[in-house]
Image (tube, helix red, strand yellow):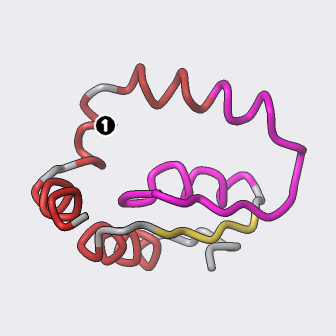
Amino acid sequence: MSDIIDYYSRFDEWGRLSREPLEFTVNWHYITTHLPPNGAILDNGAGPGKYSMELAKHGYRVTLTDLTPNLVEIAKKKIHRTESIGML
């Protein structure tokens, strides 16, 4: 488990999704296709929260979790910099 945490602690997941937007776009399409129009979502393994924040912007109540404390801290900072209502 510590190998996974170490790897993702050094990995810029938010930057990767920004640099390679096709993955986010395709995933977002399937996420929104299969979700109800509103509700609560558990984003388990959320990393830095890019999908969680987008879901919150669309009115979902989101709970974000991840094994990597560093990524949870990044998510907290990004959430506090925005006005994403609904993030837990």
Amino acid type for the residue under numbered disc 1: Ser
Taking the image as shown, residue 87 lies to the left or right of residue 20, namely right
Residue 21, x across and y down, in percent: 38, 26
Does 72 appear in magenta?
no
Foreground pick, 11 / 2: 2
Residue 60, x across and y down, in percent: 76, 60
**Which residue corresponds to the image point at 46% horizontal and 57% vertical from the top-left?**
45
23 vs 42: above or below = above
Q: Report the number of numbered marks.
A: 1
Foreground pick, 32 / 47: 47
**Which residue corresponds to the image point at 30% horizontal and 49% vertical from the top-left?**
14
Q: Residue furthest right?
A: 37
Residue 78, x across and y down, in percent: 38, 69
The magenta-colored residue range is 29-58
Quadrant of the frame with the N terminus: bottom left
24 vs 5: above or below = above
Does 32 appear in magenta?
yes
Instruction: Write down the quadrant of residue 68 in the picture.
Output: bottom left
Taking the image as shown, residue 33 lies to the left or right of residue 19, namely right
In the rendered image, which residue does mark 1 sit on? 18
Instruction: Write down the quadrant of residue 53 in the picture.
Output: bottom right
82 vs 54: above or below = below
**Which residue corresponds to the image point at 33% horizontal and 37% vertical from the top-left?**
17
Alpha-carbon neighbours of circle 1 within 10 Å: few (<14), some, or many (≥20)? few
Q: Secondary structure at mark 1?
A: helix
Quadrant of the frame with the C terminus: bottom right
**Which residue corresponds to the image point at 72% horizontal and 52% vertical from the top-left?**
58
Residue 72, x across and y down, in percent: 36, 73
